[in-house]
Image: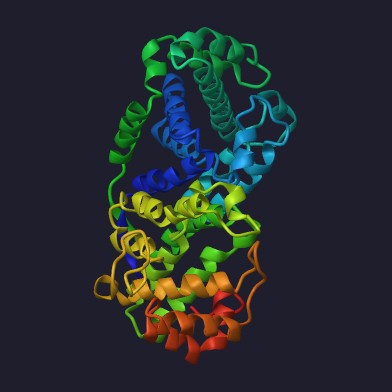
Amino acid sequence: MTFYNINLHETIYSLSDALDLVGVVQVHHGKRVGYMAAECGKQLNLKSHKLDALFQAAILHDCGVSNTAVHARLAQFDWEEAHGHCDIGAQILKSAPPLAHLSEIVQYHHTHWSAYATMDVDEDVAILANCIFMVDRVDVLSLKAQVQDSNVLLAIDDIREQIMAKRGDWFKEELVDAFMRVSESEAFWLSLEREHVNGYVFEWIEHEITRPINFHDLRSVVKIFSYIVDAKSKFTREHSDGVANLACYLGHLFELPEASCETLELAGLLHDIGKLRVPDDVLDKPGKLTLPEFKTIQRHSFDTFDILKRIKGFELIAKWAAQHHERVSGDGYPYHEKESSLSLEARILAVSDVFQALAQDRPYRGALSPEEIISILSREADEGKLDQHVVTMVKNNLTSCWQTALLKSETN
């Protein structure tokens, strides 16, 4: 089994950048919530391990949101259906051992404090979740104020009054009191600007050391983000899983080292993370894309690289994931790299991506049969776009490749 030397805080922070893409106009929402939650936590003299859990959960609190329409509704101060994304977020965090301890905090981060009186929830969980709920609403109010006027300082009194009005009902009294103390200064509000929030997060990253994490635990963390990407459209459910599965399988057929096969799987899981920037209506469009729509989609592989390159230890994952639309002819994107600069792993990932996409329904066509898929892949290889050796390997193992891409059999 492969071990990766990574800083888990850095990994969470960098991958959470993908969550910002969903909101489009609410960039850095998770990090702002993390900053405000931590400041309130310090006021309450929380112990370091609780403060760390609060900060991590705050950054990831919207991991159950993939759809831009849902994200827009969360910008309403009170939305009755907000708990749906809380349950989804808790479920996917629970599946990742390194982050499972955050699942209940995320599950209850839209629960009113008064509701806990009739619920069987650990008090520490309830306090941390309610803290995130409170500052999440603060950020919604602050963003709304900035739409009306670019200077958030003009809205301080109104925001503080609205939070105080929910004291004891929506929010725990002590939490509101802590917020009122930390939010008295202009510096608190000005620190919500991007450069200040990033600096705050970097301090948190530095508190965690780089340490070995095994492949299975790292995959469980990575799968959180592949789930978010694939859940963005009903047509891409399990796409990243299928690409990762097939890429790893082909790596084994080519007798690549186990470390390369496992890294290929991680790259496959993350290859479309940049697609969270693409509007839902473009991904689900049943007809031909316009040129502007195609160009919007075309940037996703670069956005994938831009997110992954920041994680030390992810160098190969970032490179292979970013190259999944490159072609051996040099006609791919976003770098127009040619055969000589594309590793076998990058070519395997490119073929796996095309194969799996063709095997799934899309808004403009139904899923294709294995025979139809290999016909298209062969034509692409003959035209010098996809690697001939990889396509031949798929052709020689067509049934097992089809089953693997659609997660119909255990091949790893």
Q: Residue at x 50, y 33 (%)?
A: 25
Q: Residue at x 47, y 27 (%)?
A: 37
Q: x and y percent of residue 217 in the render?
A: 44, 60
Quarter holding residue 233? bottom right
| Nearer to us in this view, 24 or 6 | 24
* Outermost residue, left side: 340
Instruction: Judge whether residue 408 can be spotted in this image.
Output: yes
* Outermost residue, right side: 118
Q: Residue at x 40, y 54 (%)?
A: 304
**Location of residue 238 with respect to 198 vertically, above or below:** below
Quarter holding residue 160? top right
Q: x and y percent of residue 120 in the render?
A: 70, 37
Q: x and y percent of residue 351 in the render?
A: 44, 75
Q: Residue at x 39, y 79 (%)?
A: 251
**Location of residue 149 with respect to 225 vertically, above or below:** above
**Location of residue 223 with respect to 382 vertically, above or below:** above
Say left or right for 183 vs 4: right
Q: x and y percent of residue 163 in the render?
A: 59, 15
